[in-house]
Image (cartoon, rainbow, N blue to C red):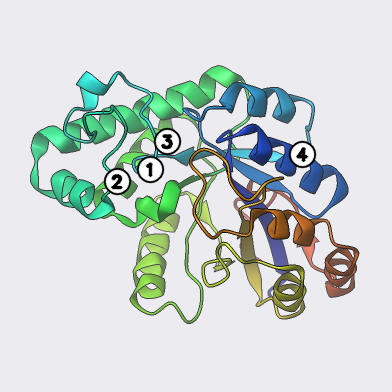
Amino acid sequence: MTKRRLVVTADDFGAALAVNEAVERAHTQGILTAASLMVSGEAAQDAVARARRLPGLGVGLHVVLADGRPVLPPERVSALVGPDGWFHPSMVKTAFAIALSPVARAQMRAEVAAQFAAFAETGLALDHVNAHKHFHLHPMIAAAILEEGRRHGLPAIRMPAQAGTGMMEHWARLLGRQWRKAGVATNDNVTGLIQTGAFTAERMAAALADLPEGLTELYTHPATVDAYPGSAPGYLYRAELAALTDPGVIAALRASGVETGPFARFAGRAN
C-alpha cells in the first residue's frame, strides 16, 4: 500500500530578512520542513546562518532566472538581463531567448552552474532544487539543472503538478517521469499552486485533510510582513506564516498520520 508522505517547503529563503525570520519561526514553531534558498538574495547570508542552526530544516536551491539578480556579473549573462543588471522581467522573453539563441542558452547554463556552486560554498547539504516561478518547467532550464545537479549529488527536484492546473500539470508530470528515469527523485503531487499567495490556515488545514497517496510537497511563501523589496503585490505573506504555525493546522497534520520531513528523507523511497 502506498503511504502518504509530506514535505512542507518555504520558497524565497534569502530574499529578505522578513522571509528568513518567517522560515525559522515556521520550522521551530510550526510544520515547515524545508526551504528553498535564493543564493543571490539580499539576505542570503542571513538565511545560511539560520539554516546552520536548524539542522532539521532541509535546504534546497531556488534557481533564479527571472525576477532577481544573477550570481555571475551582468556582462557574463548579457542576453538574460536588462540595463539594470537584473534578469528580464518578462519570463516569456527569457524563455524564447534561451530556446532560440545559443548565446543565451550557454549563459543560462553558466548561471545555473554558478548558483549551484554558490550553494555548495555555503556548506549546507543540498536537499532539493526548484526554480523561481517554476521556470524549471522550461525543458532547457530543466536539462541544465539536471546536468549540474548530478555534479552536486542532487537528491530531488520539485515537480509542480497540482490537480486542476491543466496543461501545466501534464507537462510537469512528463518532466517528472524524465527526472525519475535520470535517477533524481521528485514528489508525486504538489499543493500550493492554486493557493499561491493566499495559503490561509483554513485552506492549509483542508489540504492536509485531503492529501493523496505518495509524496506531496506543500509549498508556501511565508514572511513577517506583506511587503518587502521584491515581494509580489497582493501576496498574503503573513497569513501564510500564520497558517504554518496555526494550532489547528498543526493538529490537522498530526491527525492525518502523514510522515513528514525534507526531501532528502524520502529520496529513493517509492512507497
For the residue labelled by badge 3, is the local secondary structure a helix, a strand or a loop? Answer: helix
Q: Which residue is mark 3?
A: 150
As drawn, is 193 to the left or to the right of 178? right
Contact? badges 1 and 3 (CB < 8 Å): no
Q: Residues within 10 Å of mark 2 (few under 14, many from 20)?
A: some
Q: CA distance from mark 1 to mark 2?
A: 6 Å
The amino acid type, in three-letter code, at marker 3 is Arg
As drawn, is 37 to the left or to the right of 93? right
Tell me the residue at 52%/26% (across/down): 119
Where does residue 120 sit, x and y in percent of width and height? 52, 23
As drawn, is 154 to the left or to the right of 52? left
For the residue labelled by badge 4, is the local secondary structure a helix, a strand or a loop? Answer: helix
Contact? badges 1 and 4 (CB < 8 Å): no
Is residue 255 positioned above or below 244 on the image?
Answer: below
Earlier residue among tags 1 and 4: 4
Judged by depth in the image, the label closer to the viewer, 4 or 2, is 2
Contact? badges 1 and 2 (CB < 8 Å): yes
Can residue 212 be seen at all in this image of the molecule? yes
Tell me the residue at 73%/49% (across/down): 33
Earlier residue among tags 2 and 3: 2
